[in-house]
Amino acid sequence: MGDDGTLGRRRAAGLLTAELRALRKLRQTLSASSLHHAEVLVRGLGDGDAEVALERLISLADEYGEDRDIAAAMVSIGWDSSGENVLERLSEFGSLHKVDQRTVRRWSDTGIEKLAALLVGAAPWLQPRAILALSSVGSVVQLQLELRVPRNIAMGSPRLLLNGRDVQMDLPMIERSARGGRYRSQLADAASLEDLPVEIDLQWRGEKPGSYTAVLEGDERIRLEATVRLGHLECQLSLRDGRSVFD
């Protein structure tokens, strides 16, 4: 990703950091209703649904629950704490670790920055990923599709087309799961070398837009060109002396 993407992530992290600090100031426990103070977080984690955003924020924090700073941040914004305000929450966490409020606030500041970075990292934790692997075996090009789905994300079955023809990948609709998972199709023949060029269109829809990767292994005579357009992964396989539809 270029400089614009890096700058965009920094800006998003800054906005999320500010929102998490604002939540820390509230005199209430962390809840879906309190998240109306955190529009960027709700939009990014829940597509505008505060209940979903809360569930995913807690899931992310639990995943990194052994990190003292992140634990302090979550307590300070009102999660898993009986304190009615930030000072009480900081004192509560400090008593468990035998440190003062000032120390816990420093931990919380660092934890908030860590949470923001996790939420807008280069590979967002909540973004489903589809990997289309292509390889040549003799005179035949085979393909396999792997789906990587984060926890608490529901996705439909992917649709794969070769020259406009549906290819059955035997991959299911994916329900929300507390653990997430990986799903891999069986190997399938895509085309013989003599049939190239062939166009591939991968469509995958669900709760969150997927990211796509296309990988070609093997025969150096084959050229792979891929682009993402309107949520589709569009590829063309051709022989290196052929002309690409993207030229």
Image (tube, rainbow, N blue to C red):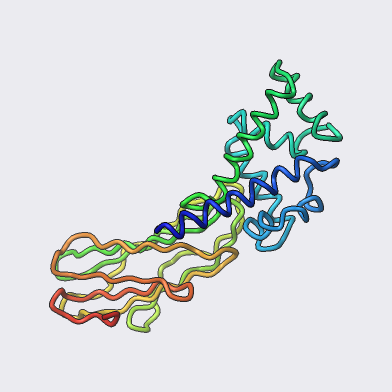
Q: Could you tell whether 94 is left or right of 16 in the image?
A: right
Tell me: residue 55, above or below residue 111.
below
Tell me: residue 62, above or below residue 36.
above
Res 39 → quadrant: bottom right
Q: Could you tell whether 68 is left or right of 132 in the image?
A: right
Res 60 → quadrant: top right
Tell me: residue 27, above or below residue 94.
below
Q: Could you tell whether 211 is left or right of 225 in the image?
A: right
Q: Nearer the viewer, residue 95 or 2?
A: 2
Q: Nearer the viewer, residue 129 or 187?
A: 129
On the image, the x and y values in percent for residue 170 come to 43, 66
On the image, the x and y values in percent for residue 183 come to 45, 56
Residue drawn 15% across and 64% down? 219
Q: Nearer the viewer, residue 155 or 128?
A: 128
Q: Residue furthest top?
A: 98
Residue drawn 66% across and 58% down? 46
The quadrant the N terminus occupies is bottom left
On the image, the x and y values in percent for residue 150 come to 54, 52
Residue drawn 77% across and 38% down? 78
